[in-house]
Amino acid sequence: MRRRSLRHALVRRWMLFAALLSLLFAGATLLLLFVLEDSFIDRRLRTVAATLPADMRTPALPEHFQWVAFDRLPAAERQRLGDRGAGTITEFRRDDGRYVHALRLSAADGTRAVLLYDVTGELTVTAGLRAGLGPAAAVFGSTLLCAWLLANAFVGRAQRHARRLLSQVRSAPDPASLDALAGAEPVHEFAEILRLHADVWRGRHQAVERERQTLAFLAHELRTPLQSARTSLALLEEATAATPSSPALSRLRRALSRLERAGNAILWLSADTVLCGGQPTPARPVLDELVDELQPLAGARAQAFDVRIAPGLCWDAPREVVETLLANLLLNAIQHGDAGVIGVEADAGRLVICNRQAAADVPGFGLGLEIARRLAARVGWRLEMQVAAGMARCELRWPAATSGTGQ
């Protein structure tokens, strides 16, 4: 949708209002002139009628006046006059093009007559319309110009005031400063907008602070059971050192790794800083370890990994963050994918995970995807997810400075 500035919109409306008001005034003036002209003509017609003799046999009439017996009028004119009583005035155009005002008369002996007043040459308003169009157009244009100038002056002042307020809002350090601006604002509507913005700002701060406290609490509470699980797993591995590793121990190791990554994710999500810079992480070892760890889960669903990584690819981000993010995405691909190949391809600018989508979707994917996006944002990366033609495609992109090649 095309957007226009408030100034442009208000100026156009002000000019439209001025144009409509001018046309309404011109129409009312023209109507008044016609009414006045008709009233003058009718008054003269009645004045002349008052001078007629009672028998109306041979009246002496001024120029443009004519006394005609009703029965001698053409049929079309008698039809226009109708059966109206004496003293009524009717105006119409005759067959020869002359415009007349007709006054119905009635003599003492019952004779019906009509006093006609030919006003064709006296219609000054109609004749002056053509001559007055030029000045009227000039006045109309001057009115629109004045409306444009006044609108720009008044609306421009309001626009500058609104822009100044926006600048102050952008530079406001806290909601209290917005409340101070609202208290000093002379326009009531602007003051209400400032107060609403301050309330929204406070609500957002409170929500973020509650989330941060919740995440910090969860991260703190996970440390003790995680440490206990690590100790117990170490004791189990020592006790079974002489025997082959059991599937139960493998599952326990994977579960512990997921818990550790979840704890790290909670800590990073509660932070406000971007976790990158000066911490190179080689791509191949991270992906190989994750594939080895998750391959048993994928195998249980008849899935297999196909990993292709550009030689020497290295990310400028902490290994723990990258590992947690990629583990989340790979696990989602396993849980929400159908049997087949899970393709993983990484080059200097992006990493793509592509696999066939499961016929029956598993609920809960939206939350995992949102968490993955937030984790990616912590290292300055961008995550995009697309599903088309039964294929799910997850793409991670990073700035060129965050990747490189190494030996």
Image (tube, rainbow, N blue to C red):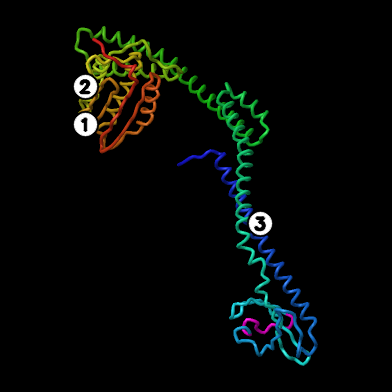
Q: Which residue is mark 1?
A: 339
Q: Give SS at disc 1.
A: loop
Q: Are dots 1 and 3 in contact, CB under 8 Å?
A: no
Upstream in sequence: badge 1 or badge 2 = 2
Q: Which residue is mark 3?
A: 25
Circle on res. 347:
none
Q: Which residue is mark 2?
A: 308
The quarter of the image holding the C terminus is top left
Foreground: disc 1 or disc 2: 2
Foreground: disc 3 or disc 2: 3
- Magenta stretch, residue numbers: 78-87
What is the x, y in percent for residue 183? 67, 28
Q: From the viewer's side, name the closer residue of 153 and 237.
A: 153
Q: Write the residue at 35% across / 31% down.
A: 365
> In the image, is residue 8 above or below residue 184?
below
Q: Quadrant of residue 11?
A: top right
Q: Main secondary structure of the magenta part?
A: loop
Q: Give SS at disc 2.
A: strand
Give amino acid for label 1. Ala
Q: Give SS at disc 3.
A: helix
Give amino acid for label 2. Arg
Q: Are dots 3 and 2 in contact, CB under 8 Å?
A: no
Upstream in sequence: badge 1 or badge 3 = 3
> In the image, is residue 287 above or below residue 81?
above
Q: Quadrant of residue 153?
A: top right
Q: CA distance from mark 1 to mark 3?
A: 79 Å
The answer to if 24 sits in the magenta stretch is no
